[in-house]
Image (cartoon, rainbow, N blue to C red):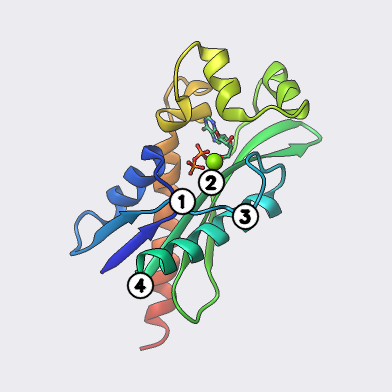
Amino acid sequence: MKIAIGSKNPAKVEAVRDCFINEANSVIPVDVPSGVSDQPFSDEETIEGAINRAKASRLAAGAQIGIGLEGGVVQTPYGLFLCNWGALAVEGEEPIIAGGARIKVPADVAERLMNGEELGPVMDDYTKQNNVRHKEGAIGVFTREAVSRRQMFVHIMQMLIGQYRYRESGKI
Ligand SMILES: O=P(O)(O)OP(=O)(O)OP(=O)(O)OC[C@H]1O[C@@H](n2cnc3c(O)ncnc32)[C@H](O)[C@@H]1O
Ligand SMILES: [Mg+2]
């Protein structure tokens, strides 16, 4: 089976590969637009980005399944939290959706995002590293790598695939 992932970010691509590795599948990374802002600022916008990527990547790769993984932030009375969402698209069906773990970002990082900066460059500046978003991610930095960005996306993938199997089994 061909599975498209709507990103070339290794943290996302490897998470998809981790979940489809034991099956006769090929995972095809494709760059597609998310159709939302580079820094989504709500669950709704982040979900929309994930769905757009899932649908567009499936079509672009001519795949049976399209996966979209999208990162954003969400404001709460307790501070600004990382949020991540995934979508799985197949032809002619509603996309399946799953959300990832969330943690609060430090106040100084939150303030920079509120002033219009993107989390990716802010994290590089904050950690004095390059491309944190392709590696452990903000969630990895702020949890001392107890949970990496890839692991967080693996968990989302497991919930997407599990729901897909549940839906498919109902059709038999
Ligand atoms: O190439 P794509 O797939 O777009 O990968 P990305 O790293 O830009 O990931 P998203 O678009 O899903 O994330 C939206 C924004 O949040 C940033 N971001 C999200 N999660 C992050 C993380 O864990 N660490 C660093 N930056 C992150 C990212 O750089 C973007 O500015
Ligand atoms: Mg992006």
Q: Quadrant of the C terminus?
A: bottom left
- For the point 42% across and 32% down, which residue is it? 134
Q: Secondary structure at mark 3?
A: loop
- Tags 4 and 2 in contact by the CB under 8 Å rule? no
Residue pointed to by mark 3: 35
Badge 2 amino acid: Gly
Q: Position of residue 77 (x, y in %)?
A: 81, 35
Q: Which of the marked residues, 4 or 2, is nearer the chain's N terminus?
A: 4
> Label 1 crowding class (10 Å Cα cut-off): few <14, some 14-19, many 20+?
many
Residue 60 locus on image (x, y percent): 41, 64
Q: Amino acid at mark 4?
A: Gln
User: Callout 4: few (<14), some (14-19), or many (20+) C-alpha neighbours within 10 Å?
Assistant: some
Residue 27: which quarter of the image?
bottom left
Amino acid at dot 1: Ile
Horizontally, residue 95 falls left or right of residue 153, namely right
Residue that label 2 marks = 100
Which disc, if any, is residue 64? 4
Which mark's residue is nearer the viewer, 4 or 2?
4
